[in-house]
Image (cartoon, grey):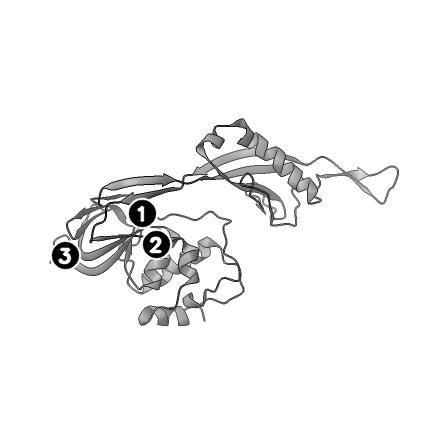
Amino acid sequence: MKLDRHVYEKDKIVVGGSLSSLSYAYINNLPVIFVELEKPFRLDSFDKNLDFGFMGLKSGISYSHRQIQQNLLLLIGLSGNLPLSANAAGMKVQENRLIISTKRHRVIKMDFNKLVVFGNSGVSGLSPQLGQKKEKNRVIDWFNVRSGSRISLDGISGEGDFVSQLYFYPSDRHGNKALKDAVCISYLTDEQLDSFDYSQTMARFKILNIMKEAGLRGKKNGKRRDDPLKINHYALKIEASERQVEENIVRYYEPDPRFEYRYDTAIELIEQASRPVGYLGFLAEKIWQ
């Protein structure tokens, strides 16, 4: 039988490529399909007190979002619940059938009782949208540190939504990993994004103040004449590199018994998680040992 003529049958299918959808699929031992895998921000990490024992991981460690995503993909894939990996190019719902086109121009058909929907990217045929709520944008500002890049700190918490968090990471511009660049996270409305008061220029000024208050200084500039035991330093210097804006839009849909729309965050799901039963739970227990 040709695969494009075969119809698979699944009770529930999770749709979406977010960390939340992967967490839900793993916790509930369900297949997950996505058109686009949402790659977490490289410096996002979970609190070290969050328990990842349900995945077989050690406690007391601050795992990055990317680490958890890769571990979830591995476990879900080994359990057989990642049927298309990252090969789905588009999805269409027709009654209780999910029709998936692949990047290799194949067609996969799956009949379902329930679609658990975390995102609508690349999916058509869902119930009509009733409305949406626009939350603050997550704004990521990248800066090159030109003077003062030998920084021992990994990050500093700011105040308020503008430059809420400042991270220092090994620079991609140098072979020397002891040299760091900076990136800050802000949460801004559309109106604030259009205002100079919340521009990268103003973020730069605020970051320089935060760095100075933390005792950071620019490059060394020889010994002081009045006290040879002390070192002169150039001023701190950073320059804007890139601004990324991540919209946060929550969409609401008409009720439909075929669909279950979920809005959980990954943290909310993980806080209530327990190890899956059966083969998937066995994998989680054994694979990291």
Contact between marks 1 and 3 (CB within 8 A): the answer is: no
Figure check: 48 above or below 141 = below
Q: Secondary structure at mark 2?
A: helix
The number of callouts visible is 3
In percent of width and height, residue 9 lies at 17, 60
Amino acid type at circle 2 is Ser
Instruction: Give the CA distance from mark 2 to mark 3.
Output: 24 Å
Closer to viewer: mark 2 or mark 3: 2
For the residue pair 146 and 281, the one nearer the viewer reads as: 281
**Residue 242, numbered label:** none
Q: Residue at x 54, y 65 (%)?
A: 60
Amino acid type at circle 1 is Gly
Q: Residue at x 34, y 50 (%)?
A: 17
Instruction: Give the CA distance from mark 1 to mark 3.
Output: 24 Å
Instruction: Count neighbours of disc 3 (C-alpha within 10 A) and say few if under 14, some if 14 to 19, many if 20 or more.
Output: some
In percent of width and height, residue 11 lies at 21, 61
Asked whether residue 146 appears in the rendered view, the answer is: no
Taking 177 as reference, is 249 left or right? left
The first of marks 1 and 3 along the sequence is: 3
Q: Secondary structure at mark 1?
A: loop
Residue marked by disc 3: 7
Contact between marks 2 and 1 (CB within 8 A): the answer is: yes
Figure check: 208 above or below 69 = above
Figure check: 245 above or below 177 = above
In percent of width and height, residue 90 lies at 24, 45
Q: Residue at x 62, y 33 (%)?
A: 205
Amino acid type at circle 3 is Val
**Residue 21, numbered label:** 2
**Residue 119, numbered label:** 1
Instruction: Give the CA distance from mark 2 to mark 1.
Output: 8 Å
Closer to viewer: mark 1 or mark 3: 1
